[in-house]
Amino acid sequence: MATSYRRRRIFWSIVLLTAALLFYVSTLGSSPLFSLPESLKDLGYSPSSSRAGQMALAKLKAATWGKSRAREIDALLHFVTQYPERRLNEDEGHINVKDVGRVMVDPEKTVDLSVYAPDGEINWEAYVRVLQEENPVVVFSKTYCPYSQRAKSLLQNYELYPPPVVVELNTRSDGPIIQKILARLTGRRTVPNVLLHGKSLGGSDDIHLLHDEHQLKGILEEGGLQVNGAFAGLQVNPA
């Protein structure tokens, strides 16, 4: 009898302990300490909606992945190619960014990627893909600079497709800001600055040297560009 009594007591003790534990866990949702992150709340996640939670987590993962894959140089190139009328200092030294407000850009410091998509529409995975496919070459130049003119002339003779995007810094109010950002990101402080997929090929002397050594055509073709015109049949030497 004693043994049977002890077994029943152990059994009911386990049942009561389990019930108490379940009750405690059920109250955690209302505790600030164990509340969900705001990012998940904003995306519509709640413990009572597993499907919504899964969708929210998928959105959060996609946003995080896109931002981690995009570099600041990609974001800058997106800005100058997709927002040709916008300026980093358009509003008394600030830029107006949707859902953020007026932002003053310090070119010496890392700029948040959202600044480079000022309309608030952010899909860095798609933006980087557009850069790779449609705008692989971007040339930062100044209209009066003879070295810039020489570099642009050489690239023009390659008749590239897609054609290079040329950004004339001296015609933009934020030209000095962009030039300092480029110096920080590419290590090159002067123009021209020829970028292929966000990586600097250098200036006029650099690309002319690559051309003279029959390497420039191969580099451009490896970057996904078509070379036409006079240099289409140029023999390529390995880099």
Image (cartoon, grey):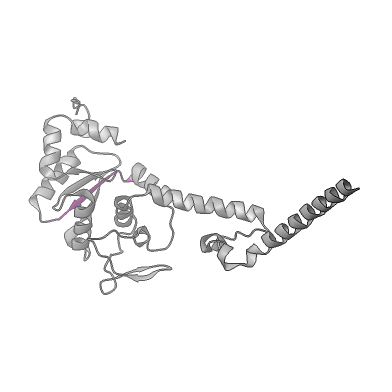
**87 up-or-down from 71: above or below:** below
Residue at x 11%, y 36% (from the top left corner)? 209
Residue at x 44%, y 53% (from the top left corner)? 123
Residue at x 12%, y 38% (from the top left corner)? 208
* Position of residue 90 measured from the top left corner of the image (x, y, whole percent): 28, 69
Q: Nearer the viewer, residue 36 or 177?
A: 36
Could you say which quadrant of the image residue 233 lies in? Answer: top left
* Position of residue 122 measured from the top left corner of the image (x, y, whole percent): 43, 57
Q: Nearer the viewer, residue 39 or 115?
A: 39
Please give left or right for residue 150 compared with residue 85 in the image.
left
Q: Is residue 36 visible?
A: yes
* Position of residue 227 measured from the top left corner of the image (x, y, whole percent): 25, 34
**196 up-or-down from 182: above or below:** above
Residue at x 67%, y 57% (from the top left corner)? 49
The magenta segment is 135-144
* Position of residue 131 measured from the top left corner of the image (x, y, whole percent): 34, 46
- Does the magenta run of residues contain 140? yes
